[in-house]
Image: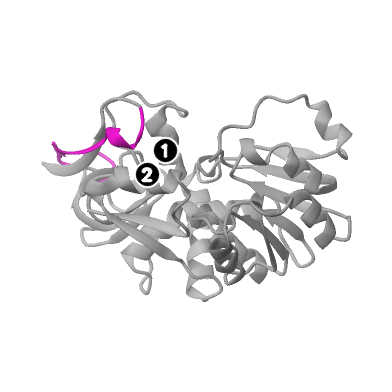
């Protein structure tokens, strides 16, 4: 048996209940890990509420890090005692769990398991956004919404290291200052300023090359108005609600724009892609170009409180659940 959060009905944070659950021996191609920390992400909210499909009962969460304690049949590329992390294995909200090795990467020496749990999903998201969905380079001008969030703080530092001019939005003065301390050249408090007008002012009317938007409903279609002609709108989340269906002609009207709705899981679908993305992240963290900000920790049993604070935008940076 182990402790885990089990969702038995979809709904608010109150449905997150800790229970004793069976823990079988790892199956073929799996390992068992004792988790040091579990990452909290907005995608966990989407599954809890039913925005993304999951059939109760289920254990939520996709990201964590820990130490291997047992091997399943056929596992040769990992060993008992290895420190490992993952970002795409359902069922993370548990003290111990079994994970298929296809989801795992080994954590390098010098990176703690807590840091690994804090950065895998958010850091690899930043990696694919900045280096694959759009190739950020010296001279790129970009806008990143939710600049003080977990992905935003990593992306701000990384984009700055790549030579970009980095503009962000945030919802309070404290979050503005936090983002400015993490790579952003300019941060717009959207509760006080029209972010479209401010972006146009900051870019001399030209607009930005790319907008990264995890907010969704509250920032669309305004995000399109921040782009240069033939610019790229990247919608990678919807913390305020999903973007409603729109006429594709809108992209033409606003300057022959491009739009994409990527997910991390499509970018790490093969072992080669996962290793490349994770190694790129490990390298930039170990080079000290990107710092991982763990700003909140909660006991695993208080996952409901963590979700409440996340949805109320009371958190910044990365949040961990500690078994």
| Left or right of 204 on screen, residue 189 | left
Q: Which mark is residue 62?
A: none
| Left or right of 73 on screen, residue 187 | right
| Left or right of 192 on screen, residue 79 | left
* Residue hosting label 1: 45
The picture places residue 107, in percent across and down from the top left corner, at: 37, 63
Instruction: Categorize mark 2 by other alpha carbons within 10 Å: few (<14), some (14-19), many (20+).
Output: many
Q: Residue at x 66, y 58 (%)?
A: 168
- Label 1 with label 2: CB-CB less than 8 Å: yes
The picture places residue 293, in percent across and down from the top left corner, at: 45, 66
* Circle 2 SS class: helix
Q: Which mark is residue 307?
A: 2
Question: Would you say residue 246 sits in the magenta stretch?
Answer: no
Span of residues in magenta:
11-31
Give the quadrant of residue 200. bottom right
* Circle 1 SS class: helix
């Amino acid at each position: 048996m182990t402790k885990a959060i089990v969702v038995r009905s979809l709904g608010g944070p109150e449905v997150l209940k800790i229970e004793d659950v069976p823990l079988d021996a790892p199956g073929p191609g799996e390992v068992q890990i004792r988790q040091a920390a579990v990452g909290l992400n907005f995608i966990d909210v989407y599954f809890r509420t039913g925005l993304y499909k999951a059939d109760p009962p289920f254990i939520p969460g996709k990201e964590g890090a820990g130490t291997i304690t047992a091997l399943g049949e056929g596992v040769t590329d990992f060993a008992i005692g290895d420190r490992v992390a993952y970002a795409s294995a359902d069922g993370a909200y548990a003290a111990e769990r079994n994970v298929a090795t296809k989801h795992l990467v080994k954590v390098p020496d010098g990176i703690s398991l807590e840091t690994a749990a804090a950065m895998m999903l958010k850091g690899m998201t930043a990696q694919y956004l900045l280096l694959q969905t759009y190739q950020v380079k010296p001279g790129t001008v970009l806008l990143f919404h939710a600049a003080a969030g977990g992905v935003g703080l990593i992306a701000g530092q990384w984009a700055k290291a790549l030579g970009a001019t980095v503009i962000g939005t945030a919802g309070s003065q404290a979050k503005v200052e936090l983002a400015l301390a993490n790579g952003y050249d300019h941060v717009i408090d959207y509760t006080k300023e029209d972010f479209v007008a401010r972006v146009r002012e900051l870019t001399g009317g030209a607009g930005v090359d790319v907008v990264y938007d995890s907010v969704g409903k509250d920032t669309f279609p305004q995000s399109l108005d921040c782009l240069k002609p033939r610019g790229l709108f990247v919608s990678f989340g919807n913390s305020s609600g999903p973007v409603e269906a729109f006429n594709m002609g809108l992209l033409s009207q606003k300057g022959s724009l491009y739009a994409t709705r990527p997910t991390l899981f499509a970018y790490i679908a093969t072992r080669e892609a996962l290793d490349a993305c994770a190694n790129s992240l490990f390298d930039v963290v170990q080079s000290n170009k990107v710092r991982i900000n763990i700003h909140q920790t909660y006991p695993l049993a208080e996952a409901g409180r963590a979700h409440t604070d996340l949805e109320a935008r009371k958190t910044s940076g990365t949040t961990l659940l500690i078994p």
